[in-house]
Image (cartoon, rainbow, N blue to C red):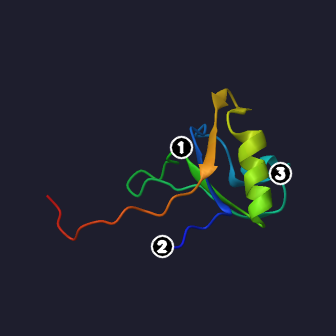
């Protein structure tokens, strides 16, 4: 199993936050490779979390250290290393 140590999960985001705003925030820790804010397929509304990929593992570790628990537009964000998606069975109930 390959865990990407540079990719971070950012939770408890305000729905109003933009990818640009997140990039600017995370650049305080180092170079940002990409920012993705998933949206709900049916409504098109942001889902309240994002994935931020840093350029280096050191930058990712610094981002967790300085940004986890930070207030962003009135919400305390959670910043953690991203985990691979769970295996899904082919059956739907």
Pointer 2 or 1: first along the chain: 2
Determine the residue positioned at 76% across, 49% down. 63
- Mark 3 Cα shell of 10 Å, populated few (<14), some (14-19), many (≥20): some
Quadrant of the rendered structure where residue 92 is?
Answer: bottom left
Give whichever of discs 1 and 3 has the lower sequence position. Answer: 3
Contact, mark 1 vs mark 3 (Cβ under 8 Å): no
- Look at discs 2 and 1 and give the one toward the viewer: 2
The local crowd at label 2, few if under 14, some if 14 to 19, many if 20 or more residues have their Cα within 10 Å, is few
- Within 10 angstroms of label 1, few (less than 14), some, or many (20 or more) residues? some
Task: Tell me the SS state at disc 1.
Answer: loop
Q: Residue shown at 83%/51% (left/top)?
A: 29
Pointer 2 residue = 1
Where is residue 47 drawn, in percent x and y?
49, 47
Q: Splitting the image into 4 quarters, where does residue 31 fall?
A: bottom right
Residue 48: image tag = 1
**Residue 29 disc label:** 3
Q: Residue furthest front?
A: 1
How far apart marks 2 and 1 lie (CA) works out to 27 Å
Mark in the foreground, 2 or 3: 2
Q: Is residue 41 left or right of residue 72?
A: left
Question: Closer to the N terminus: mark 2 or mark 3?
Answer: 2
Q: Residue 58 is drawn in which quadrant?
A: bottom right
């Amino acid at each position: 199993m390959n865990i990407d140590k540079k990719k971070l999960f950012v939770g408890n985001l305000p729905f109003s936050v933009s990818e640009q705003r997140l990039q600017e925030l995370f650049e305080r820790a180092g170079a940002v490779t990409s920012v993705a804010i998933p949206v709900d397929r049916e409504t098109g509304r942001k889902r309240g979390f994002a994935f931020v990929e840093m350029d280096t593992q050191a930058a990712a570790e610094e981002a967790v250290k300085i940004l986890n628990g930070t207030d962003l537009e009135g919400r305390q964000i959670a910043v953690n290393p991203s985990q691979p998606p769970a295996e899904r069975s082919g059956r739907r109930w």
